[in-house]
Amino acid sequence: MRICVVGTGYVGLVTGACFAEVGNDVCCVDVDERKIAMLQEGRIPIYEPGLEEIVKRNASQGRLRFTTSLKEGMERALFVFIAVGTPPDGTGAADLSFVERVAREIGENLESYKVVVTKSTVPVGTTLRVKEIVGEQVALRGRTDLEFDVAFCPEFLKEGTAVEDFMKPDRIVIGTENNRTAELLKELFFLFTMRENRMLSMSIPSAELTKYAANAMLATRISFMNELARFCELVGGDVDQVRQGMGSDSRIGSSFLYAGVGYGGSCFPKDVKALIASGDAAGSPFSILKAVEDVNRAQREWFLQKIMAHYGGDVSGRVFAVWGLSFKPQTDDVRESPALDILPKLAAAGARLRVYDPVAAENARMHLSEWSGSMEYMEENYEALEGADALLLLTEWPLFRRPDFPRMKELLKTPLIFDGRNQYSPPAMKSMGFEYVCIGRG
């Protein structure tokens, strides 16, 4: 099948590359000329395991193309996927200007029947607004002969495993207005669910809400565990043991029950804010989600205060090694990363920071440029430890799970670890002579 994907961020580029990987003819479109030039040269603007190989292979074999012209991208396509950003505006609501701009341009260039599929995460009613905008532009051209349909197919891609998530989805949600569109999309996605039919067909509003509801529920689990971790510290509980006890209940399961320094990234913070804003606008406030957001924000401050309290509230002149800058492992994405909250506050308090991340250092450097005088970016994780007063572990990269503890002890000025991800065993750390400050484990 012939497909046009508008937007080459995490969602758009993974979507286009994976569709091409199973034999479709795909053209990816983006207004960013620099990004398109990179992709045409075989360079990937984001870090996502497995993506570069798929992009290069399918581009070299002619199934995957890149252009800045939506007209060119749409020309032969049956499906046009909208996968542009919907960042929060000043109120927390989703900014739909990019989606609406693409819809207008689709209407301006429509010459034959298309299925216009919203892939971006959008509030309820947006896909029908896309239909309205496309229709208005077609009408302005006097093209009463043109037909098109709209649909909403949310993405459920986790950064770090996005390629695998697309190729082996646990479900595919298809929101449509009619059976014709549903059947076309089922045919398109069939190759990804051949062993087990995991397609769910529903109304467009239900599909739009499903995406927000899923992310909001996962964010809620994380915030609950973080609040529980604080309580554990007060009463002598171990949140990791509690997690195991809870997770063994089949009604709950073990996913997203890990305490830490809070969720981040491009989805959970944005989607929680957007659903709160949608609820307020509809007169049906999401009180639970407002608390989820408050807890997430407070968790970072709570961890920071643990560090400050250890030094009697004064970290001036202290040197901290930092392992991890991305919001989660296996990605270079630092959007809403806990590190971007915690490190500037330590720098403002007079601390110096020796930071390391396997792939996210350059992205973090741009966001932390104001504090460049207080930060030194290291090429290797052990190098960051040299002469540091303590280690702050902020991202649970696999590289950090089994480090050389004797070497760490030699390099650190004092054997002290503030672990924001509960990577190590408190008894084991104590036996090796480390002072170990973690989350909710006594």
Image (cartoon, rainbow, N blue to C red):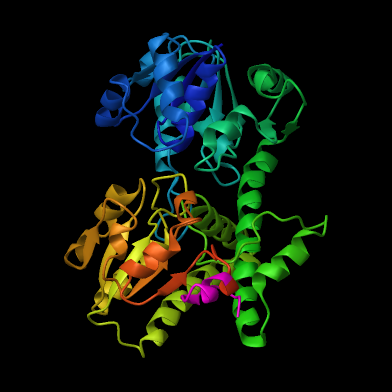
Q: Is residue 266 visible?
A: no
158 in relation to 428, above or below = above
Q: Residue at x 74, y 33 (%)?
A: 200
Residue 227: % across, % down: 61, 74
Q: Observer-nearest residue: 361 or 17? A: 361
Residue 148: % across, % down: 57, 19
Q: How many marks?
A: 0
Q: Residue at x 36, y 48 (%)?
A: 358
381 left or right of 256 in image: left
Residue 301: % across, % down: 44, 76
49 in relation to 435, above or below = above
Q: Can residue 98 be seen in this view?
A: yes
Q: Report if residue 165 lies within the magenta region.
A: no
332 left or right of 201 in image: left
Q: Observer-nearest residue: 37 or 153? A: 37
Query: Which residue ends up furthest to the right in the rendered image?
Result: 250
242 left or right of 55 in image: right
Q: Residue at x 33, y 58 (%)?
A: 382
227 in relation to 424, above or below = below
Give the quadrant of the C terminus. bottom right
Give the quadrant of the N terminus. top right
Q: Observer-nearest residue: 258 or 166? A: 258
Query: Which residue ends up furthest to the left in the rendered image?
Result: 373
Residue 122: % across, % down: 54, 43
Q: Report if residue 433 lies within the magenta region.
A: yes
Q: Dividing the picture into quarters, in which one does residue 388 lie?
A: bottom left
60 left or right of 231 in image: left
> Which residues are the magenta region?
428-442
Q: Observer-nearest residue: 143 or 57? A: 57
